[in-house]
Image (cartoon, coloured by chain):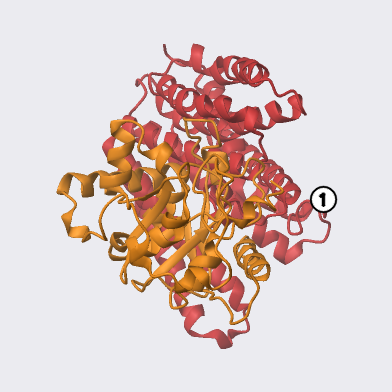
Amino acid sequence: MNDTRTIALIAGVLLLLTVATAVGQFLKRHPDRGLDPAAVNTFNLRLRGWWIMCTVLAAAFWQGPTATVLLFGLVSFWALREFITLTPTRKGDHRALFWVFFLFTPLHYVLVGYNRYDIFSVFLPVYGTLFVLARVAIAGDYKRFLERTAKIQAGLVVCVYCLSFAVALLQIPISGQPGGGSANFRLLFFLILLVQFADCMQYVWSRMLGRRLVAPEVSSNRTWEGLLGSATSTALLAAVLWWAAPPFEPWQAALAGFVVAVMGFAGGMTMSAIKRDRGVKDYGTLVVGHGGVLDRVDSMCFAAPVFYHLTLLVTGAGPAP
Amino acid sequence: MPASGLDNHPMLFPADQSPADSEYRPPAEGQGKVRPARLTAAATRPGPRPSSARSTLCRAAGLSLAALARLLSGASVRWIASQPDACQRVYFANHTSHLDALLIWSSLPQPVRELTRPVAAKDYWSRGIVRRWLAEEVFDALLIDRTDIKVHQSPVDLMLREIGTTRSLIVFPEGSRSVTGEVGDFKSGLYYLAKKRPDIELLPVHIDNLNRVLPRGEFLPVPLLSCISFGPPLWLESGEAKVDFLARARKAVLALKE
């Protein structure tokens, strides 16, 4: 099949990471180059994160679709955990939260794993919502009722529902092949690559050209220039890498790249707003020495559903039952 | 709880209820120190027992429960200006959840854990076979009879006798689990412990967010992230008044919140 493409993609990523690591280590050893040591440190930490991420992803891909779904399920679970931890809840929410964590989240991923698009596309937004509303009401605490249920629901939708669309990419039939093939894994990796790249570019362009902050009260480093720059460069990268993402023509890939960058930006802004409201810097402040999982996947959460539906549009197929 | 009357009890009420008795009057200052420990009666079990006496099954149960608690509560452990050590210590913490003692216990390194005994309420933990087994065999808890407090078996004396010169304790000086999540006033047991054994390190511990993992009155946990902070040890200053010392100890716990 097209496995030369997979190999090329893997080799390219490994090469890029290796070069970046070498540069990072060089800069670390030569602090006299006039670069901000804190920025170099951040860069190296980020790189280490990517190495870990690539290793874990590779292991999951190697094991197949089930392992990948499980991996994303665990990431969702952990992200939701961080989300609810930083969101004040009341005792009346306790039982609803229990079922959200131990029934709705796992069950949703089971449905995704079995590619029941007809059910999983409404399971959390409809049934999850109804359940949370009713369970909190039955618990008998009506104080700030809508606010509390909205928090739980937002957590469920962003951390679980949206993120699961990334792994649902594995099920889309591509060019006559049923889902679960190497083309699907490439597609998923393509998405992850674009999201991460867009994040970086946003930072780089903001540093270089950034003048007008989008919302200074929410984020002090996200600028309009950064957004535009990141969307353009991500579109370019996607167009260059179009061969790795099976159903896309180059222009379609570019469009997907553009949209992914914009959605990733939206995700970052949203999570910043929540963090600002709670007065914390990272979701992982409770875990010493780590930025949280949610800090890593916030852009992904917003980009995944759109990318999924773009892919459906391009392949012209509904998700096979 | 306003607790000005209850505060006179030289004990640590380890769980739900306030003390039932009202007859007891604390010994005058210094009197408790003079009274030899061996005169106090009716221990739940004779003397400190070497931890090696616990069976492999109990150890395995302890380890797996500790691991499960750590997993469910996502606890990160911080040692602030202190280190885990096998020296004799009294860990005193805010009390918010049934998981508190288990989590502090599981946050300690294995060798220290073997030396450390949680203090718990006898009326609660000796009810039923499972609870009793957990308390006595798995966690080697020191059970305090809250309903039968007499001058001759003051819980502080019982604790001191049980730990001998090697074991450490986990206590919750608030006496009962906080409903609001605020740290309440400390009962005076900690003061009497410090007074009778000035050589023991008193280590403040702050437990954050565990009341949301397993609040009072719930039995199913929600797996949020919690944080356990161990602070620098403190001792009773010479001539320090009881009220001052207890306020200082409480402040030491609160200071670990950030």
The foreground one among A104 and B15 is B15
Chain ID of residue with mark 1:
A
Residue at 27%, 51% in the rendered image: B45
Quadrant for the C terminus of chain A, please: top left
Q: Could you tell me residue B157's position as x and y percent?
A: 42, 62
The three-letter code of the residue at mark 1 reads Ala
Left/right placement of residue A317 relative to residue A148 reads left
Left/right placement of residue B39 relative to residue A163 reads left
Residue at 55%, 25% in the rendered image: A95
Residue at 75%, 54% in the rendered image: A219
The foreground one among B12 and A309 is B12
Left/right placement of residue B175 relative to residue A206 reads left
Q: Which residue is mark 1?
A: A215
Q: Could you tell me residue A36's position as x and y percent?
A: 63, 77
Which element is circle 1 on?
loop
The colour one sees for chain A in the rendered image is red
Q: Is residue A318 visible?
A: no
The foreground one among B104 and A122 is B104
> In this picture, is A108 found above or below A54?
above
> In this picture, is A209 found above or below A33?
above
Q: Could you tell me residue B151's position as x and y percent?
A: 47, 56
Label the orange chain with its letter: B
Q: Is residue A157 visible?
A: yes
Q: Dot 1 surroundings within 10 Å: few (below 14), some, or many (20 or more)?
A: some
The foreground one among B33 and A154 is B33
Where, by quadrant of the figure, is residue B88 drawn? bottom left
> In this picture, is A87 found above or below A321?
below
